[in-house]
Amino acid sequence: MSLDTSSAPVRQAAETWESLFRTQVGVMRRLQKDPAFKELSMREYDVLFNLTRCPTGWIRLNELNVHLLISQPSLSRMVERMESKGLVQRRPAENDQRGVEVSLTEEGRALQRKLGSAHVRGIYELLTPALSETEMQELKSLTDKVLASLPANDG
């Protein structure tokens, strides 16, 4: 069965995706201009942020990669650079010595908190002039719904 890509529902889906994507690109470009992100790239901050969400404090590199939009080899190199800056630490995985686990250092945790405050403030300053509180709740509900519909292994 082929999908008629000229149909109105298909065009609407494509236009909706394009709008969502362009909005995300525009917002990320604005957020990256925040002086707080002179110290660390937005992608490095994303690694620190995701590490704060690990219940045990440690996560396998391949599991961390599921939450990021970066290739596994690029993540490995980034983690090595972040380790040399004293922001993260690595160790062999407890249950599989071939794997690598990563965790925040105290310095990394402190930097994430500092940048996180600036990041949240920047998001607030970008979204509140454009959307009401109700609209933000609605947008979150819609994006959560799309995320929940994705297959589990896609992150």
Image (cartoon, rainbow, N blue to C red):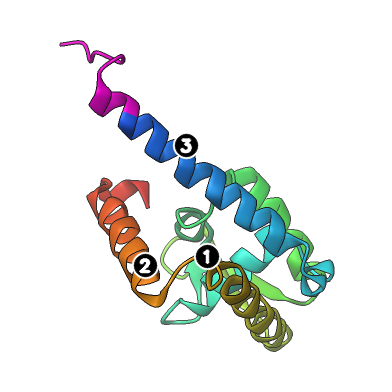
Residue 13 location, quadrant: top left
Circle 2 packing at 10 Å, graded few (<14), some (14-19), many (20+), is few
Closer to the observer: label 2 or label 3?
2
Q: Position of residue 52 (x, y in %)?
A: 53, 79
Residue at the disc numbered 2:
135
Magenta-colored span: 1-11
Mark 2: which amino acid? Glu
The answer to whether residue 146 of the structure is visible from this angle is yes
Between residue 63 and residue 15, name the one nearer to us.
15
> Who comes first in sequence, dot 2 or dot 3?
3
Tell me: residue 28, above or below residue 131: above
> Whole-percent x and y of residue 74?
67, 46
Residue with the mark numbered 1: 130
> Which residue is found at the position 61% from the left and 57% from the top?
27
At mark 3, the secondary structure is helix
User: Which residue is labeled 3 in the image?
Assistant: 18
Q: Please, is residue 86 above or below residue 107 in the view? A: above
Determine which of the numbered discs, if any, sits on residue 107 in the image: none
